[in-house]
Amino acid sequence: MEENLPEQEIPVDEIPKPVLEEPKSKSKLNVWLKSIGSLVFFLVIGYFFFRQNWTLVLVLTAVVIFHELGHFVAMKIYKYQDLGIFFIPLMGAYVSGKKQEISQKQSAIILLAGPVPGIILGIILFYLYAQTGIDLLEKIGWILILLNVFNLLPVYPLDGGQLLHRLFLDEYNVLGKIFVVLSAGLMSWVAIAGGFYPLLFFPFMMLSRMVGDIKHENIIKKIEAEGIDLVKTYDEISAKEYWHIRNVLIRHYPQLKDVNPSPPYEISPKEDQVIMLMQGLLQRSIAQDLSVIGKIIILIVWIASFAAPFLIRNPFLYY
């Protein structure tokens, strides 16, 4: 007579974590399709907002693209992945990319690579206007300078606000949050006082993101308190770490309430959502590689950029 032996439980280390990532070629195609789609939407909304003035719409779009290409090229040089440019109607655009190890120095250069070339080009166009008298050069020069100088204001999430945040506040978490709240309040006041209510989208997103970040930080603290290092990529976490983190996510995210915790180690129909949330918890390491002198140089470049509107009125540009 055969004896029924109990099934042996498979060690968690032998249970592979799921791999649900898209092929790189498809991922890149999706990024660029979204970029082109957002650009078309940006143009259409701008066309109707500016009363069908195609010249103004195209000039503004060209200025925005030139600005974002500065960020894009700098991020490409520093080997960011999954790069794409996404346009927000009536607001501007932003470059999206991924990198595990972030350098403070590289971040500062990337942030300045958008507005500084635009300001320099604007000054050059004013010089050409002085030589040729072509009014369009003067108008484009003003747009380049004013929009890029505005982008350097010390208000988050503008480039100037991000620059100061990265230089001085990343290592001081509470001060960073206070800076975001003050920036959101200032931007809300400008939107309401100026009657440009679409601008309220930015402070709403800033505060929403901060609330989400606080939730993430609390979950990260609980996971790291159990001895799991989260400063790594998804590919670097072990199978054991994956299933452990997965259980923590199930406990804290309502959208995963119908996902069964492990064991048993079974793939859920919502596993791609689990992976997305897990990737949001995994942290990037930030190298504080800017010396005091380096920070002073960055600040000098930042402050000097605000002199551009006054520089173009200098008579030497016209002779």
Image (spheres, grey):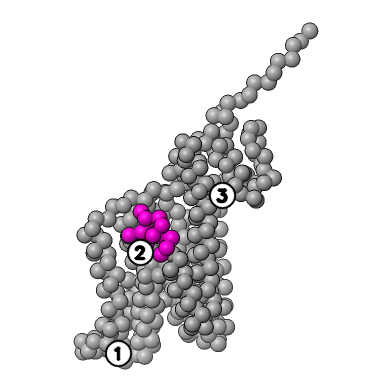
Task: Tell me if residue 176 is in the magenta stretch.
Answer: yes
- The picture places residue 167, in percent across and down from the top left corner, at 32, 60
**Range of residues picked out in magenta:** 163-179
* Observer-nearest of 290 and 317: 290
Q: Residue at x 45, y 66 (%)?
A: 181
How dense is the environment of label 3, judged by Cα within 10 Å: few (below 14), some, or many (20 and up)? Answer: few
- Judged from the image, the secondary structure of the residue bearing numbered disc 2 is helix
- The picture places residue 242, in percent across and down from the top left corner, at 54, 38
Could you tell which of marks 1 and 2 lies nearer the N-terminus?
1
Residue 11 vs residue 162: left or right? right
Q: CA distance from mark 3 to mark 2?
A: 28 Å
Task: Tell me if residue 275 is in the magenta stretch.
Answer: no
The residue where tag 2 is placed is 163
- Judged from the image, the secondary structure of the residue bearing numbered disc 1 is helix
99 to 5, vertically: above or below: below
- The picture places residue 140, in percent across and down from the top left corner, at 38, 83
